[in-house]
Image (spheres, coloured by chain):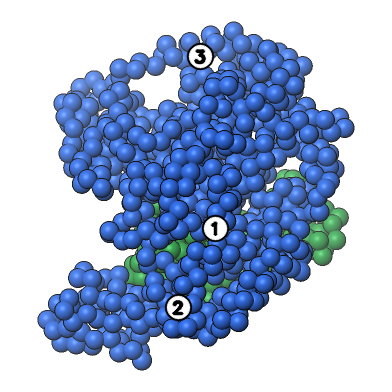
Chain colours: A green, B blue
Amino acid sequence: MEFNLNKVDSVIDKHPAKRDALISILQDIQSEYNWLPREAIIEVSKKLNIPLIDVYGVATFFSQFSLKPRGKHIITVCLGTACHVRGGPRILDEFSRRLNIKAGETTEDMQFTLETVNCLGCCAIGPVVVIDGEYYGGMTSRKIDSLLAKHTKVDSNQ
Amino acid sequence: MNKIKNIDELGKIKTEIIKNLSPETPCIIISCGTCGQARGALKIVEAFRDAIKKLETIQELPIQLRITGCHGFCEVEPNIIIEPEGIFYVKLKPEDAEIIIKETIINKKIIDRLLYVDPVTGKKIAYKKDIPFYKYQNQLISGNNSLIDPTKIDDYIAIDGYKGLAKVLTDMSPEDVISEGKKSGLRGRGGAGFPTGLKWEICRASKGETKYVICNADEGDPGAYMDRSLLEGNPHSIIEGIIIGAYAIGAKEGIVYARNEYPLAVKNVGIAIEKAREYGFLGKNIFGTDFSFDIKIVKGAGAFVCGEETALIASIEGKRGEPQQRPPFPAQKGLWGKPTNINNVETWANVPVIINKGADLYSKIGIGRSKGTKIFSLVGKINNTGLVEVPMGIPLREIVYDIGGGIPKGKKFKAVQTGGPSGGCIPAELLDLPVDYDKLTEVGSIMGSGGMIVMDENTCMVDIAKYFLNFLRDESCGKCLSCREGLDRMYEILNDITEGHGTMEQLNLLEELAPVVKEASMCGLGQTASNPVLSTLRYFRDEYEAHIKSKKCPAGVCKALIEYSIDPEKCTGCTACVKACPQEAIIGEKKKPHKINQNECIKCGACKDICKFDAIKVE
């Protein structure tokens, strides 16, 4: 999505211009752009009158925020303890190998971002992977190809 | 809706709601927590709606549908309960909906193929009350999840919701409430187990006009999700608890600090707060008294350390979630420098139960200094994965075997990990341990928030210790050197061991570092971070030594120390593994035993996943 300063301003204006609104504002900006563009962080700092270093500090502290653009499809591999003992790391390795990126990275064509999460709390169906908000339980390495194909296909149908 | 002004009005509304319910009308209760939804529960709901619409054209069908939160039995989602009989159907598909209405509701027949099969006896069980998973529990707190639609406040009022609050505001002084809390013996369910009544008393005694109460819903322990289930399935019980606590302490504002990874929980709590306001349980002059109080939700942004009280407060204030030195404790100087009381979700949910039941009756449940029930999430290598609520003091064996149904595929039980990253691993020889705060601490673990991860012979204990250290070094806020650097060094040692170049000297260094990190770190994260290492070293030292001395991973987990091979006796030459192998590392003719080319094998496990004959060996 094109960066638009007015849009960022309208997100900020929905909140009180106070320090305790900072995290909610960053969350809203991220849900708009899928990441936190540099210009948006600077704008938040100006409008809330909080030093840039503090805004940056918060944006880098919490794992929810991304300071790099993320892909069209977000793949989240759960690495909670239950998923770990059921083979979650192997699933992550396989996604990583097939997409040729490490966890936290995005493919060159900006299609897929590979992320991990520390627990989604649906341990019964572990190992769990979430792609674009859809949950896939009982993951095995051989389901990966069809899942990637499925989510790429959704695009071509659109 | 007019605001409810007193206890009589609440009673009248309850009578009105109950009058409109007809207990004889068949009710299909569909478990729709996040777990259930991930397994397609919402599609089941749609299918039932469609089927009812379709069949209604033929005959009159007084059927109720109740969309509820999680019933705890995640293993067999999507599942339904059919009332009034209490029939339990599991692992449903959308096409089953119409058949269930025709067969079970209209023709009163039980459908055999949809019944739960007991993994121990192999027998099918028709009624929820007879299933061992439920039979041996005491669902004091979590049981209400199946009785209410969390988006409907009337459902909660029908089961005596907000009656405790009415009683507190009309009949009890704040001191009475605190004394009741103390008498109940309730201790914090979030981890440390601090006595709740005492915590309230300290905060009440703190000087200051403005005070805050916070509900810690930042459930970050991997493998623990009881709070999520309560937030999703019975949010009003938590809200009622918070209001009662706020009255006891003298707070006018409350905050639910919820984990961002739990969207459904945030949504349901939001709806519940709105409804409670509409009915006058939140806002000005609650139940016509002088007491005014309101709650807002603040969403976390993904930081495990924010479960720690002072870090949580910093995060609400819009700062990095770094813990502060204590004292001053939050009860003295918390949010915005004002006295603040923080309790976790499950603790708050216990409060209305204590008020309704009375502290004396409540404290009869449990053992010693651990009163009431505790909800555990029983996960990992266990047959009946799910949320399990039991009285404190129950032996671990009963949880794992009677309720949990034992270990899948006939494997051997190795350990159970409790307390999340701050906890420890309890070995098989301690299976008869009564589960309470003090006993768990004695054996080197903790109660924590109630995660219980079962491990079998294929779980490597060194790998588990490494897993937790990796988790903790990633989540360490970096403020204390001992935690920031200490955990990194400990992780490096464990990594060396799992990669086959660890030494016995390193093991000594590990044991030397662990207490330093514990002693020199400021907050609970660092102070308990060594527990997973210390407890695995205490009970599974032989596994560490096997990795170091024989360069073997006995459980077959650590990639650098294992090899995949094919058992020629079992291999039928079906070629399934050949197709599955991403490296083309498997060779052999059709219908003849295959072989793995070790130079090409990347140990991804794809062959083992696909083999139907158990012919892939990992050694």
Q: Check the image and report above or below for A92 versus B319.
A: below
Residue situated in front as seen by the camera: B7 or B398: B398
Taking the spot 56% from the left edge, 83% from the top edge, the residue there is B503
| Residue B14 - label | 3
Task: Say which chain tag 3 marks.
Answer: B
Instruction: Indicate the amino acid at tag 1.
Output: Gly
Q: Are marks 3 and 1 in one subunit?
A: yes
Element on which disc 2 rests = helix
Task: Say which chain tag 2 marks.
Answer: B
Of circles 2 and 3, which is in front? 2
Quarter of the image containing the C terminus of chain A? bottom left
Q: Check the image and report above or below for B467 versus B309.
A: below
The residue singled out by tag 1 in the image is B424
Taking the spot 47% from the left edge, 23% from the top edge, the residue there is B155
Q: Check the image and report above or below for B516 versus A9.
A: below
Query: Which image quarter: residue B372?
Result: top right
Q: Is residue A87 left or right of residue B237?
A: left
What distance separates the C-alpha of mark 3 from that of mark 1? 46 Å
Q: Is residue A142 left or right of residue B570?
A: right
Q: Position of residue A49 (x, y in %)?
A: 86, 55
Of circles 1 and 2, which is in front? 2
